[in-house]
């Protein structure tokens, strides 16, 4: 099992609930998203969200499990009241890609991003760091049972299961290719 705190379907069900809220927020301010959108959970750690056009006005939106996991764990653990703005702004970022002529971060997409900020105060960027997504740097140390750290750049990599931990003799930091050490 990939998730300690929930299953893939559990996260997908949560994502659909959040996506409905976001769609309504957008239609309330006159932004029309596509009618035909499927949702998936993105398992690649370095991708917050992705929108793929797959046919005539049909889209698949993938949202990173970390965003769903973090918001879920906040409720589950109850000790951490920090919000996860990243979940909302990532879903909206991707939903805006399903508007007309909006697959890139061009004029149409940017116009809607401005509108969302003006109406809701939600900041949407082309790319985001953990910090801007509201994911604390110590996320892995706080919540996940196993973690590696890059000796060179300090990047942290967390794991639910011991068998997911890469061999640190053979693997290097994905960000800077530095050596990894086990910290947990
Ligand atoms: Zn984008
Ligand atoms: Zn590194």
Image: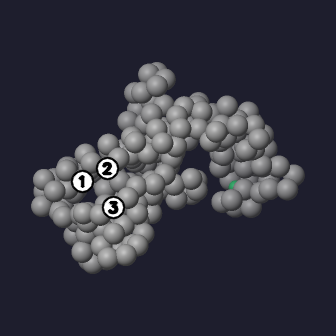
- Residue 38: % across, % down: 38, 58
The disc label shown at residue 23, or none: 1
Q: Nearer the viewer, mark 1 or mark 3?
A: 3
Q: Quadrant of ligand 2?
A: bottom right
Neighbour tally class for label 2: few under 14, some 14-19, many 20 plus, Cα within 10 Å: many
Q: Nearer the viewer, mark 2 or mark 3?
A: 3
Image point (87%, 52%), residue name: 169
- Residue 138: % across, % down: 58, 37
Helix or strand or loop: what does disc 2 sit on? helix
- Residue marked by disc 3: 37
Disc 1, disc 2: CB below 8 Å?
Answer: yes
* Residue 105 visible in the displayed image: no
3D distance between C-alphas at marks 2 and 3: 10 Å
- Residue marked by disc 2: 19
Image point (72%, 49%), residue name: 150
Neighbour tally class for label 1: few under 14, some 14-19, many 20 plus, Cα within 10 Å: some
10 or 138, which is in the foreground?
Answer: 10
Name the N-terminal-most of marks 2 and 3.
2
- Residue 154: % across, % down: 67, 48
């Amino acid at each position: 099992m990939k998730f300690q705190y929930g299953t893939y379907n559990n996260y997908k069900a949560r994502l659909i609930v959040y996506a409905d809220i976001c769609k309504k927020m957008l239609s309330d301010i006159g932004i029309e998203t596509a009618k035909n959108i499927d949702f998936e959970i993105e398992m690649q750690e370095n991708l917050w969200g992705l929108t793929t056009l797959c046919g005539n006005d049909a889209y698949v939106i993938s949202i990173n499990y970390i965003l769903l996991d973090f918001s879920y764990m906040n409720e589950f653990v109850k000790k951490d009241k920090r919000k996860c703005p990243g979940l909302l702004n990532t879903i909206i970022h991707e939903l805006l890609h399903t508007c007309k002529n909006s697959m890139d971060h061009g004029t149409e997409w940017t116009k809607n991003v401005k509108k969302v900020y003006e109406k809701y105060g939600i900041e949407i960027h082309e790319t985001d760091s953990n910090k801007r997504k509201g994911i604390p740097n110590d996320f892995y140390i706080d919540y996940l049972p196993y973690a590696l750290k890059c000796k060179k750049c300090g990047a942290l990599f967390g794991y639910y299961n011991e068998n997911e931990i890469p061999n640190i003799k053979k693997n290097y930091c994905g960000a800077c290719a530095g050596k990894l050490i086990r910290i947990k």
